[in-house]
Amino acid sequence: MKKVILFFCFLIIVKASAQKYELGKVTKDELEEKVHPNDSSAPAAILLKKAKTRFIYSDKKGFESKTEFSIKIKIYKKEGLKWANFEIPYYVGYETLDKEAVVILKAYTYNLVNGKIEREKVSSEGKFKEKINEFWETKLITFPNVKEGSIIELSYELNTQNLSELPGFQFQYKIPVNYAQYITEIPAFYIYKGIKIGYIDININDVLENTSQGYVNQYQQTNYLNYQQIKTIYDVSNVPALKEEDYVSNINNFYGKIEHELQIIRFPNEEPKQIATTWESVAKSIYEEKDFGDELSKNGYFLSDLKKMTDKIVSKEDRLKAIYEFVKEKMTWNGKFGYYTKKGVELAYKETSGNVAEINIILTSMLKMGGLDASPVLLSTRDNGVPLFPNRSKFNYVIVTVNLEGKQILLDATDKFCSIGNLPIRDLNDKGRQINKDGSSVEINLMPNFISLYNMNFFANIDANGDVSGQVREQYFGYNGLRFRENYSSIAKDSYIEKLEKAHPGLEVENYELRNDKIVEEPIIESYFIKNKNVIEKIGDKMFFSPKLYLASQLNPFKQENRQYPVDFAFPYKDKYAFVITIPDGYQVESLPKPMALSIDNKYAAFNFLISTLENKITIAINLEINTAVLPSNQYEVLKEFFKKVIEKENEKIVLKKI
């Protein structure tokens, strides 16, 4: 998925031949343009995006970086109006560095009014600062008077003392990009590794050049620093929108972009200093922070509760279960992410609520004091993206791992609906990093390797009018059960039944019962009776219906001609359907769909369809199995064809004929 580019000082000069694009020169033709020339479906397009990263030297602080971003966007359709609201996140959670800062340089809306171009400036009321958490803040910009046909322009500057990485630059979005360019001017003292993400081709041109800059020394005198710098120009033209469809964890992982990680610092007359960190060093530095390691070492606040809970429990497995259930029930997650405690474990325990770190550090400490081999695991959640290189800011979450008799068990006590070994779906994001007190760390696979089963038994009766009635029983195991509880635990019974009926026109649900919704170790069980007058198609003396009655899938979730990013199912699963359909008196089966068996590479996915008749009953068994949490993109066309055949089979007709 990614290519790695190393930059050295002996780079060859290559002249860029990119088309010239400019900000501040909005034309009448641009404003009159009704659709994007390469993508008529685009609700908006980025006409131009530019950024330039420079290193600024001061006598007190040394080098820091300033990056000026500029962007010009055309709005074509009503759906594109959301592109007129900008969020610019920046990091403020440094321990030894100043906070990053964002300065808005200019922001305008352009419209064509009575044949003339009018420009309107974003007022102070359209600019906001918002604190996301203790680590991140964001600048919000709302453009005025934006409508179909408008063009907006924005320029801003990001200042940071953190040179361990440069600001990432994104070339691709959900809308087309006409032209994008990123320039870096990096003093030759700093050697960065450029990491290319995504699947677009980026033109790269480099030159080593002499430069200088003035600075004021401690005596208020102006001095000049002369040095060489590596100037790199990245540019792309006519980048298509990255189309998102079902089964993707975080589309931001796959946009074409470039990021830079600092590898070496080599100042004159000094030995080169290796800077690039490892996940081990990142994990170790986090463990040593007082809001992590020190909090993990505290235990006096829970000892009496732990003793009452485990005093008579002998086996480690039972102790693990007791402690996990205790913490999960006692503590309520406040919705805050992060791997550092905010108010501390003792106060969080007393108040019975806290952030992710507080709850799972409490769980880790109690497990350790309970005689279990427990350690914290740092990770990045699905919404936060997959980390590309080691950096403290790439993690935003912490869970717990327990080694029990050679088996690794992952735990997260923030979710009331999780059971032992089932993490919240937000945690299922590739790899995490277990960290230990001695500074060592281990990579942890977060993706589930067990099948989550969904099972439906449907006993249906068809009467002479073609009306269907019957009894349904559904079971949700593993992550299917977790997802059901998370989606429907707060919905009243009547509202849920109404939702079911709306999903299938003509359906009536009666005598609905739900079991085990509060017992997370057991599968969810639904049972109910149904009536449906909208299932059977009667033509003359024949009846036509699909093997799954009103449950047949209609649309293939995979529509693109090709897909460059992987298919993320979140967890492996198996759907099993068993139908016993009683046909009406006076009818017989004229034709049935043929049995079918499909698979992808004999391992990724499988589908089996069996059907038979005996007297007045039709028995149908349908199994769909996805055996991997993530399917590689090179299997996409096969997967699309697989689901096409599955849907076709589900919609083939059973034909009954009147005797």
Image (cartoon, rainbow, N blue to C red):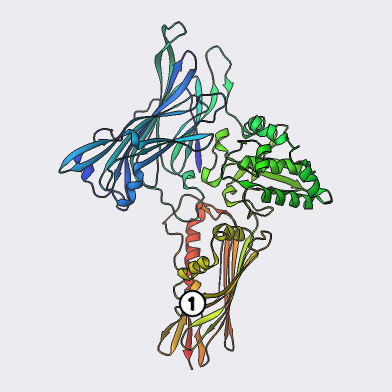
Using residue 419 as the reference point, say whether residue 385 is left or right of it.
left
Q: Residue furthest left?
A: 114
Q: Position of residue 432 (x, y in %)?
A: 62, 42
Q: Position of residue 214 (x, y in %)?
A: 40, 12
Residue sitting at 68 percent across and 44 percent down?
400
Q: Position of residue 386 (x, y in %)?
A: 54, 42
At label 1, which amino acid type do we have?
Ser
Q: Position of residue 633 (x, y in %)?
A: 50, 52
Nearest the eye: 22 or 143: 143
Q: Is residue 618 visible?
A: yes
Nearest the eye: 152 or 453: 152
Residue sitting at 43 percent across and 12 percent down?
225
Q: Is residue 593 above or below residue 207?
A: below
Residue matched to label 1: 546
Nearest the eye: 158 or 146: 146
Name which quarter of the figure residue 206 lies in. top left
Residue sitting at 47 percent across and 13 percent down?
59
Q: Residues within 10 Å of mark 1 (few under 14, many from 20)?
A: many
Using residue 121 as the reference point, say whether residue 129 is left or right of it.
right
Q: Is residue 633 above or below residue 272?
A: below
Q: Is residue 26 visible?
A: no
Label 1 element class: loop
Q: Residue furthest front?
A: 351
Residue sitting at 49 percent across and 68 percent down?
498
Q: Is residue 39 above or below residue 228?
A: below
Q: How many marks?
A: 1
Using residue 373 as the reference point, say whether residue 609 is left or right of it.
left
Q: Is residue 457 above or below residue 559?
A: below
Using residue 48 as the reference point, say whether residue 622 is left or right of it.
right
